[in-house]
């Protein structure tokens, strides 16, 4: 039994339905491809954890691959790879996702494997004892990769004890001590109908896809939505140096940005692109090409349900750290003071629109975009509507966002590396 909603556009390739237990089912038909990417999203991530459960969502994502009621770990690995497809998963701040990409003729097999993984994992204690070692190695990998670690340190200091500042991987202590009962509880309470989005993009017909989801997920308990995130504290600002031996200093400037649904996201995307989004960007031209202070310099952004994060990364030798910091701050101050001149704004719009259109040639990218509208409960925008949103951004919108979010005094700078000269 399904409750069907009308597609946003009469001729749209997008279809959206809800099963009677709350599972949202989405599909987008992409003409001319012979593949389909299918995904299951659970509204459960690092932002929903606390205390000794830090890292539980990610550890559970790993553990389901150790075996289900119908498949061993090896069977899961072979089920789609043996068909030339792929199976993967990830955990984010607010979601856990499982995805499969296969030829269109194997869509039913992909959906069956994903349902098996998400609904029927064995979650055995002996498997957890093995898999926690894998995750501990993953944590060690981040610890040994300073240009990854500096982002973890920045998040911790920007948001303090708030879940947005927690490592998605958890800590060594929480992972090492995680009881299997905690993972079973999360699976029982969170992997329920009202927390699930099942979507497909590619050569997919919505009717058969919906029937498959109904058959595999229709018997799942509806449960309760459980994706609450605590209110955010005031974000930190200032300058923090974390001493660590190495050949480079890794610098992250950043501050809290608006939430995913906030319309200021569009001018911020344009600002980030102009500031550090490629070889033609201000920071690349200034810091790398003109001053030769770094090999890697870029801007970054993330948007979540309650807030986002926008900032800049640069890696430089310790003796040049001060010069690099000054150069980035100068560019931040200039863009905060002046915004973007009309010609640069128009060029950046063309660049961002081109990047969006090129990225959406992938069925995986189309799937993530499709699921995003559901997960953040935002109205679906087709590609033309998204491009129109970008075109509609004015110089005043950009100037306002730049003054608010790129002021150097608002930034939290975290420096990881030896003491600079």
Image (cartoon, rainbow, N blue to C red):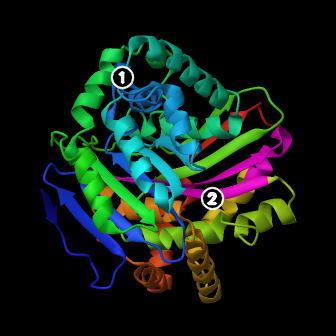
> Residue 58 appears at what percent x and percent y?
45, 32
Does residue 275 appear in the picture of this structure?
yes
Q: Residue at x 84, y 53 (%)?
A: 293
Name the one closer to the observer, 366 or 287.
Answer: 366
Which quadrant does the C terminus fall into? Answer: top right
186 with respect to 203 (left or right): left
Does residue 162 appear in the picture of this structure?
no
**Mark 2 vs mark 1: which is more N-terminal?**
1
In the rendered view, tell whether residue 138 sits above or below residue 45: above
Dot 2 lies on which element? strand
Q: Which residue is mark 2?
A: 299
Which quadrant does the N terminus fall into? Answer: bottom left
Q: Residue at x 72, y 64 (%)?
A: 283
198 with respect to 156 (left or right): left
User: Quick check: is 311 in the magenta stretch?
Assistant: yes
Name the one closer to the observer, 403 or 209.
Answer: 209
In the rendered view, tell whether residue 245 sits above or below residue 317: above
> Residue 310 appears at what percent x and percent y?
52, 56
Q: Nearer the viewer, mark 2 or mark 1?
A: 1
Q: Quadrant of residue 145?
A: top right
Q: Which residue is mark 1?
A: 122
- For marks 2 and 1, give the CA distance: 42 Å
User: Quick check: is 222 in the magenta stretch?
Assistant: no
> Residue 301 appears at what percent x and percent y?
53, 57
Q: Residue at x 51, y 20 (%)?
A: 131
Dot 1 lies on which element? loop
Q: Which mark is residue 285?
A: none
Q: Which residues are magenta?
A: 296-324
> Residue 358 appears at what percent x and percent y?
61, 74
Is there CB contact under 8 Å for labels 2 and 1?
A: no
């Amino acid at each position: 039994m399904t409750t069907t909603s009308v597609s946003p556009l009469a001729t749209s390739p997008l279809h959206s339905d809800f099963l009677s237990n709350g599972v949202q089912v989405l599909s987008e038909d992409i003409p001319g491809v012979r593949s389909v990417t299918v995904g299951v999203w659970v509204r459960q991530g690092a932002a929903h954890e606390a205390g000794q459960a830090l890292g539980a969502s990610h550890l559970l994502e790993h553990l389901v691959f150790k075996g289900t009621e119908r498949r061993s770990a090896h069977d899961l690995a072979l089920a789609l790879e043996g068909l030339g497809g792929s199976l993967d998963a990830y955990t984010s701040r607010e979601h856990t996702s499982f995805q499969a990409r296969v030829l269109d003729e194997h869509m039913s097999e992909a959906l069956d494997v994903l349902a098996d993984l998400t609904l029927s994992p064995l979650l055995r204690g002996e498997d957890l004892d093995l898999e926690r070692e894998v995750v501990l190695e993953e944590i060690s990998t981040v610890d040994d990769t300073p240009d990854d670690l500096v982002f973890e340190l920045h998040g911790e200091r920007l948001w303090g004890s708030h879940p947005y500042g927690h490592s998605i991987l958890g800590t060594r202590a929480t992972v090492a001590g995680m009881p299997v009962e905690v993972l079973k509880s999360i699976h029982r309470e969170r992997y329920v109908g009202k927390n699930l989005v099942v979507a497909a993009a590619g050569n997919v017909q919505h009717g058969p896809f919906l029937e498959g989801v109904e058959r595999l997920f229709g018997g799942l308990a509806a449960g309760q939505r459980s994706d609450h995130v605590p209110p955010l504290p005031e974000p930190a600002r200032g300058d923090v140096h974390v001493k660590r031996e190495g050949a480079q200093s890794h610098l992250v400037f950043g501050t809290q940005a608006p939430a995913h649904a906030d319309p200021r996201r569009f001018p911020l995307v344009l600002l980030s692109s102009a500031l550090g989004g490629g070889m033609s960007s201000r920071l690349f031209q200034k810091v790398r090409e003109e001053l030769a202070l770094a090999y890697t310099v870029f801007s970054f952004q993330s948007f979540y349900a309650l807030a986002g994060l926008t900032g800049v990364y640069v890696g430089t030798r310790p003796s040049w750290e001060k010069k690099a910091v000054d150069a980035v701050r100068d560019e931040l101050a200039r863009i905060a003071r002046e915004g973007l001149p009309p010609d640069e704004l128009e060029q950046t719009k063309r660049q961002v629109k081109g990047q969006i259109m090129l990225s959406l040639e992938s069925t995986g990218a189309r799937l993530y975009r499709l699921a995003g509208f559901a997960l953040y409960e935002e109205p679906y925008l087709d590609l033309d509507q998204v491009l129109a949103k970008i075109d509609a951004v004015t110089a005043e919108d950009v100037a306002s966002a730049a003054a608010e979010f790129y002021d150097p005094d608002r930034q939290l700078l975290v420096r990881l590396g030896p003491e600079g000269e």
